[in-house]
Amino acid sequence: MEPVLRVEGLAKQFLLHEQGERIPSCAEVFLEAWEGRLTALVGPTGAGKSSVLKCIYRTYLPSAGRMLYRDRAGRLLDLARAGEHEMLELRRGELGFVTQFLYCLPRRSALDVVAEPLVAQGVDRGAARDRAGAMLSRLCVPERLWGVPPATFSGGEKQRVNLARGLLGRPRLLLLDEPTASLDPATAERAVEVIQSMKADRVAMLAIFHHPHLVTRLADQVVELGQPLAACAGKDH
């Protein structure tokens, strides 16, 4: 069996134009993500854990390395060199990302925000909303909030909506950036149960967790990142 994702020598640097310096975020990252398994990224603050996820999702353009992704059809694609159209298609149907913050249109209801990935995959809107409601219930979002724009929610409520949207689509590869950091213990436990069910559904996952005990509980393999080298002069590549 081949991994869903193999990352080889990934590096990301940020260029400070005025100073002419490169600020390293992550360097020489090697990891794999497999169907039905969760790979946890660990390391000190500043080691570039979130940058790795953003490079894979192509929020950031990597400075070096390869990110070899095998899609549902068996095609192998280097995400580091994929075109924008290819990335949009993958995000629509195969790549999911639960970030630490919820980004959505300000006037859309929580129910429509959560249902959006399913609608993008071609699921009937009514059926997508039904499934979105079930996931919101599972993550303890009161039904009275489903028709309200999440911009008015508390931080914990926004994160529950964010998590519900990311988990509902059952992507081939799911990226999780501290998904339970702002959740109360009961809701965090619900989220863990959903993540475990996704492993059973053979979703490949790459995750950063706020609490080390979640790494112990959920991770099938752990990749540790060290601090990148200090800033150096020259232009970014």
Image (cartoon, rainbow, N blue to C red):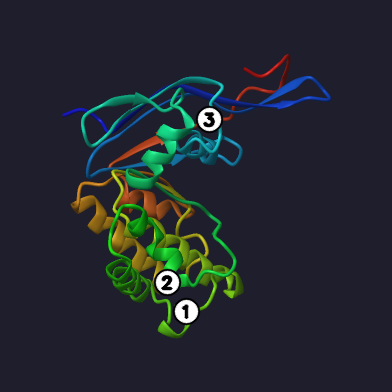
Secondary structure, mark 3, is loop
Q: Which residue reaches farthest top?
A: 234
Instruction: Kindly identify the residue that appears in the image at 34 percent across and 69 percent down.
Output: 132
Give the Cα distance between marks 2 and 1.
6 Å
Residue 111 tag number: 2
Task: Give the quadrant of the N terminus.
Answer: top left
Instruction: Return the x and y of residue 183 as percentages of the image width and height.
Output: 48, 67
Q: Residue at x 46, y 25 (%)?
A: 80
Q: Crowding at label 2, few (<14), some or many (≥20) Cα neighbours within 10 Å?
A: many
Q: Answer with left or right where residue 205 lies relative to residue 183.
A: left
Mark toward the start of the polypeptide (1 vs 3): 1
User: Identity of the amino acid at label 3?
Assistant: Gly
Asked which quadrant contains residue 27, the reply is: top right
Foreground disc of the pair 1, 3: 1
> Residue 78 falls in which quadrant of the image?
top left
Q: Give left or right: position of 204 versus 51.
A: left
| Identity of the residue furthest to the left in this view | 1
Q: Amino acid at mark 2?
A: Leu
Q: Is residue 234 above or below residue 53?
A: above
Q: Measured from the top left, where is residue 234 in percent x and y?
A: 73, 14
Tell which of 207 and 69 is nearer to you. 69
Vertical placement of 157 versus 71: above or below? Answer: below
Mark toward the start of the polypeptide (2 vs 1): 2
Marker disc for residue 123 = none
Name the residue carrying label 1: 147
Report how far apart the C-alphas of labels 3 and 2 lie in the structure: 40 Å
Look at label 1 and name its amino acid: Gly
Mark 3, residue position: 226
- Label 3 crowd bin: few (<14), some (14–19), many (20+), radius 10 Å: some
